[in-house]
Image (spheres, rainbow, N blue to C red):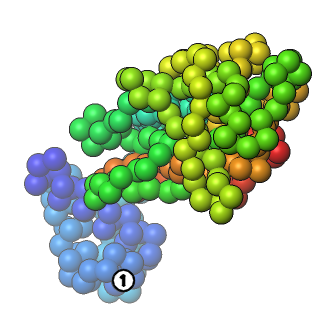
Amino acid sequence: MNITRLNHLQGMLAFVHAVSAGSFTAAAARMGVSKSAVGKSVAKLEAQLGVRLFDRTTRSLGLTAEGSLYYASCAKILDELAHAQSALAHRRQQASGPLRVSLPVSFGRRWVLPVLLDVAERHPLLRLDLSFTDRPVDLVDEGIDLAVRIGDPGDSASLACRGLGRQRSVPCASPAYFARRGRPRTPEQLREHDCIVFARGGRVAPWLLADDNGSPLAAAVRAAHTIGHGDALLDAAVAGLGIAYLSTWLAADALRAGRLETVLAERAIDDMPINVLWPHSRALAPKVRVTVDALVGRFTPAPPWAGDAA
């Protein structure tokens, strides 16, 4: 916008305020400027238009015929401008635009995805961009708005974090397996059973159980089967292949339906934190704020699967 158009807009604003307020003095008070500034703006506007807008007397300020016609148009234009500014401000406060989220594969699909779908339904201007991976993700370098992660969130100064709870894992097997092989009564007896272990990249995940003093202990187990996918690990346990060390969020439905039963549940511990992370640079974005609030509201104070692995 060039200077002439800017002055014209300022003149329109001064003109409309002068008409609605009834005087240059009242218009100046509304606009927070001097009376002379209002008078100069209106005079410049009249010069640009080549017409008189006001019939000025010492006691009154009346509109000319041209002024009445011009006022109706100006009032409409300024009203539309105010509406556009209000709509833009409202949009900036809404959750909108693409929301890039990184989720762990099994946990993300089971428990986080329903929350995100609900958020998207309530905020139609939001566009989900979801990726599912269990690998570490650099949120800043990869342009991720937020991520849900199970495990130590690290100490990155560039990330904000809110806790969603803690993961609890417990040995589980099918009723048929326990009927066939019996139940271990102590962590040491797990070595006498067929155990299905989770491994990825050559690393076997430990079975953390509480010892007699309540401290975490990596139980020694005999690996009858090794599986590198959480859902497949669950399926193998349900099929009766052995005892699997399963997160309660993963086994919740099978436990509720009686397809799995827990063993040594009194030894179960909360082994890893579950967090939602996001870059500090995105902390004030409405799309991040409403999503984090929805996740915290869903998972705290108790997670949705709580009580299923009693």
User: What residue appears at the point 44 percent right and 35 percent down from the top-left corner?
Assistant: 101
Badge 1: how crowded within 10 Å, few (<14), some, or many (20+)? some
| In the foreground, 303 or 38 | 303
| In the foreground, 50 or 125 | 125
| In the foreground, 260 or 58 | 260
The picture places residue 243, in percent across and down from the top left corner, at: 70, 26
Q: In this view, does 28 lie above or below 42?
A: below
Q: Element at badge 1?
A: helix
The picture places residue 158, in percent across and down from the top left corner, at: 28, 55
| Picture quadrant of residue 234 | top right
User: What residue appears at the point 82 percent right and 22 percent down from the top-left corner?
Assistant: 181
Question: 262 left or right of 75?
Answer: right
User: What residue appears at the point 85 percent right and 18 percent down from the top-left corner?
Assistant: 180
| Picture quadrant of residue 102 | top left
Would residue 179 be seen by someone viewing this image from the given angle?
Answer: yes
| Picture quadrant of residue 253 | top right
Q: Quadrant of the C terminus?
A: top right
Q: Is residue 68 above or below residue 113?
A: below
Q: Name the residue under label 1.
A: 29
Q: Is residue 293 above or below residue 109?
A: below
User: What residue appears at the point 32 percent right and 41 percent down from the top-left corner?
Assistant: 139
Question: 90 left or right of 6?
Answer: right
User: Looking at the picture, which amino acid does disc 1 mark?
Assistant: Ala
The picture places residue 301, in percent across and down from the top left corner, at: 70, 58
